[in-house]
Image (cartoon, grey):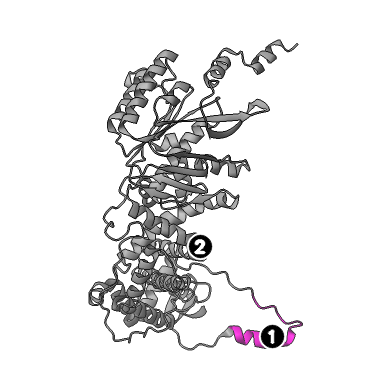
Amino acid sequence: MQAASGCIGGPAGPFRAAAAVADMKDSAMDLRGYEASGSSQKVATHAALAASAPVAAFGSILFPPGFEERRPDRADEPDCFIDLNLDQVIAAVVAKRDEEVLRPIFYSCYRNEEIVRYRQAVFADLERPDVFALFPVFREAMRSIRADLGYAEQISYRSHKHTVFLRAVGLYCRGVTTLLRDLRSVVPQSPGLGDFLSYLTAYSESASFRQLASETAALHELLSNLSYGMLFRGDQVTVRRYASEPDYTVAVLERFAKFRETEAEPPAPRKNTDGFSLNHIEQAILEFVSRLFPVEFRRLDEFVDGHSEFIDETIARFDREIGFYVAYLDFIDPLKRTGLPFCHPEVSVSSKETLVEDSFDLALAAKLVQEKGAVVRNDFHLSGHERLLVVSGPNQGGKTTFARMFGQLHFLAGLGCPVPGKAARLFLPDRVFTHFDREEDITNLRGKLEDELVRLHVSCETMTSDSVIVLNEIFNSTSLDDQVFLSTRVLERILATDAIGVCVTFIDALSTLSDKTVSMVSTVDPEDSARRTFEIVRKPADGLAYALSLAQKHGVTYEQLRKRVRP
């Protein structure tokens, strides 16, 4: 027969039995200033106490006051995402995060200056390292709370279930008080984080939270001080109250001390383990302990019953929404560390004056940075009546990348995110339309040209003067005469709506179609015409793009001819 003694505040012998409560000591709240509840105090419901103490209003960290109801509820990916490679960007941003929560936020951009500037101010706050550092820690604490509550739902033993629940409440209280303390210390400047700090201050001082925190601390202290013993007879275990048995470990060490030649090294600190994942034997021991101390565990049961909904909904919503900012800043951080610039664009829903300096394709840049490649940056602007950038030049010169950059900038601006570039002034569109080459779809029984016409017809019928459109080499599947005719008609329709956009083409005549069009050309190295610079500059089309395209198609470029005649 073996005997072992222990307490709820620490493991007994080889068993962790009640370590579920014991480990709460490592994660206990700093609740100084809160008075512990007396043992006879009854548990009050969280909701009833909340009603007695009004808390400062705060709606959302994504939307300013008055716009809180505009929740992002778009579950499907916007049509422009694949063409602009934004599907790759967002997939990387939300990877290993709460995708179901974050994707609808990244899918929903807004044509509203107040919303965009509200988010820009929050981003500006979070770009301070001392402010940003607070929120990954807070979000991890909230994730642990949700994990504990999810685990508790799977536990069949009542005492074990309730000790896990108690730990979750303790983590929640610590998370709230820690975030409040740290957020006060960094003094946020944005209206969003400032309002949340006011809310958090009022909430932490409310009767409901004080009661929750004090009861949690008192109950943890009560359970941690319970002691018990265990007797082992073969495969049987008897659990009983601790009877002040002597600690034989001390007696043995003292008896053999005279044989010790050197001082024994102190044991290495025991690795902190969760202690909540108990096997069925340990759970049964904890149940026996609860029968030994029915009054104390009855208080635990009453606590759980009275605080089943202990997480404040506003704080839970903040946890979900702040992830939008944290995820995006984490994604662009490696790019910023290589020197690539990001800025908060000036935005407008009325002015179409557009100016972008040193910008780049975000999806391509993320790939090139991983591969240690160079990222080429470009500028563009639209002023006065100018509405459409017509980009021409040699193939593989960066034209399509430039067009994607144009579309990405406008979509990201509508999210309120920092955009690639040193400086930017952007129009907020109601929608971003794209038209890129697609594989022929045999299921719709239409040829490639007819399919292009149908898709463009839908876009032209849907777009408004507040839209942005990105066209990439349309009607390449038909003859040159038909391509010129159809492209001209489509661009005339777009210009008539007064929408802004970009069109990639090798048809130079499209760049002079109207005083609303602006010609931009992809350039090559002046000393080596075969070397692309990937820089797109504002200048008249030089007439060489189509000629070079034809020469390449028929194999009569200078390089191709040299290969043919080489001996």
- Residue 6's x, y, as percent? 48, 80
Q: Relative to 543, does residue 254 appear above or below in the rendering?
A: below
Q: Which residue is mark 1?
A: 256
Residue 247 picture location, percent across and down: 55, 85
Look at 46% across and 36% down and name the residue there. 404
**1 or 2: tag closer to the N-terminus:** 2
Asked if the residue at tag 2 contacts the one at tag 1, i.e. Cβ–Cβ closer than 8 Å, the answer is no
**Is residue 241 depicted above or below 189 in this figure?**
below
Q: Taking 51 as reference, is 17 left or right?
A: right
In this picture, which residue range is highlighted in magenta? Answer: 249-267
Please give left or right for residue 276 compared with residue 317 in the image.
right
Q: From mark 1 to mark 2, how far is it between C-alphas?
A: 59 Å
Q: Judging from the image, what secondary structure is the residue with disc 2 in?
A: loop
Considering the image in quadrants, where does the C terminus appear? top right
Q: Quadrant of residue 452?
A: top left
Q: Is residue 477 at least partly visible in the picture?
A: yes
Question: Mark 2 packing: few (<14 Cα in 10 Å), some, or many (20+)?
Answer: few
In the image, 197 versus 19, the foreground residue is 197
Q: Inspect the image, locate mark 1, and give the three-letter code of the amino acid beneath it.
A: Phe
Q: Secondary structure at mark 1?
A: loop
To which quarter of the image does residue 439 belong?
top left
- Residue 296 or residue 534, whichever sits in front: 534
Residue 210 percent across, percent down from the top left = 33, 79
* Mark 2 lies on residue: 128
- 10 left or right of 287? right
Q: Residues within 10 Å of mark 1 (few under 14, many from 20)?
A: few
Q: Nearer the viewer, mark 1 or mark 2?
A: 2
